[in-house]
Image (cartoon, grey):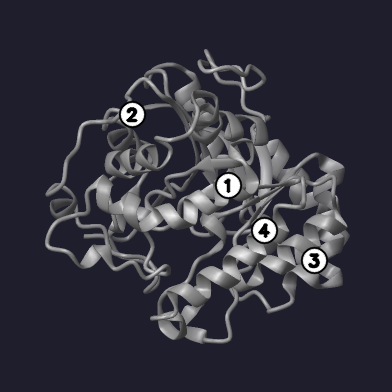
Amino acid sequence: MSAPSHTHQIPVREEWLATTVEEALDPAQPIVDPHHHLWDEPGWRYLLDELRADIASGHDVRATVYVQSARSMLRADGPPEMRAVGETEFANGVAAMCASGRYGALRACAGLVATANLRLGAAVRPVLEAHERAGGGRLRGIRLTATWDPDPTMLNPAYAPPEDMLDSPGFRAGYAELGRLGLSFDAWVYFHQIPRVAALARAFPGTPVVLDHCGGILGIGRYAGRRDEVFREWSAAMRDLATCPNVMVKLGGLGMRLPGFGLERGERAPDSITLAEAWRPWMEHCIETFGASRCMFESNFPVDKGGFSYGVGWNAMKRIAAGASADEKQDLFWRSAARFYRLDIPGLDPQRRNDTP
């Protein structure tokens, strides 16, 4: 059993996950997984071996993007603002291992999203440059978690962002450095904060933004039993955000406890039909609003692993995309991610259209 760092993460129960095993649907569909983590915490080890074991479930995952976790391999000493550079060094080492070819065709961590305290303003520039050096040419963006809610039980204790972080002058001065260095921003917020992301995207139209985890849907705590109300507020905010051409969306992150689907409470792990039924209204709205070329499916593993297995999760996403055109499927499963994160993946050309890679 895993040891989650806070109550929003569902413990991973391997025996429970093993109660539902499916063969991969459409196994020839190439996939770029644009959002996963790696860490080695007491009671919860998820490193390259564990990632490869999940990917071995039958789907054609060609490459992945590593996203900061605020807990992996931080430097033990040195200036506090530089300690997260250790995480980039670590992830780049994993990428180098995979690039050697000794671990098969998978190019794990082909793109890296680091973290830096953008509230430092222009003084964050040396930190970003240190990440670039540590990333060995693989650094693509920065994520500084902004999830905030008036209910303190909704907050991740690993972060303490103020409510107005994305609007604050200090943050925006640091954010301006991303555009100067050609870096993107991963926005992890709750659904009621999406208007702040839209304001940020409009203020810096040259900086690419990707909204993580379908925009932070909430269905626990004070949001329990308010699914329709949350959907109305969320969907209106997403329609407005979609008018920002520099913004894309990651479709995933719904295996956490936060959305309140409660599927982890079943005697058996959910199958892909059950997952697709729960996720469809949210993911389909994203695709209809932003278009397939601005959406990318993600695993959010191992965080989402408490709710479903890797192979079943991708089957659910393939069920949701079943009605899409062949060209739209390429966008959703790999091309949008490859374009956004500027990935060079053998055998895949993100500039090519039509129905096959």
Evaluate whether residue 158 shows in this view.
no
- Spot occupied by residue 233 in the image (x, y as percentages of width and height): 59, 72
Type of amino acid at the residue the image marks with label 2: His
Q: Secondary structure at mark 1?
A: helix
Say if mark 2 contacts mark 4, CB within 8 Å.
no
Which residue sits at x=68%, y=55%?
82
Residue density around tag 1, few if under 14, some if 14–19, many if 20 or more, within 10 Å: few
- Spot occupied by residue 343 in the image (x, y as percentages of width and height): 62, 27
Nearer to us: label 3 or label 4: 4
Q: Secondary structure at mark 4?
A: helix
Q: Which residue is mark 1?
A: 288
Type of amino acid at the residue the image marks with label 3: Phe
- Residue closest to the eye, 249 or 91: 249
Q: Secondary structure at mark 2?
A: loop
Vertically, is 310 above or below 263? above
Which residue sits at x=75%, y=48%?
128
Q: CA distance from mark 2 to mark 4?
A: 32 Å
Q: Which residue is mark 3?
A: 171
Type of amino acid at the residue the image marks with label 1: Glu
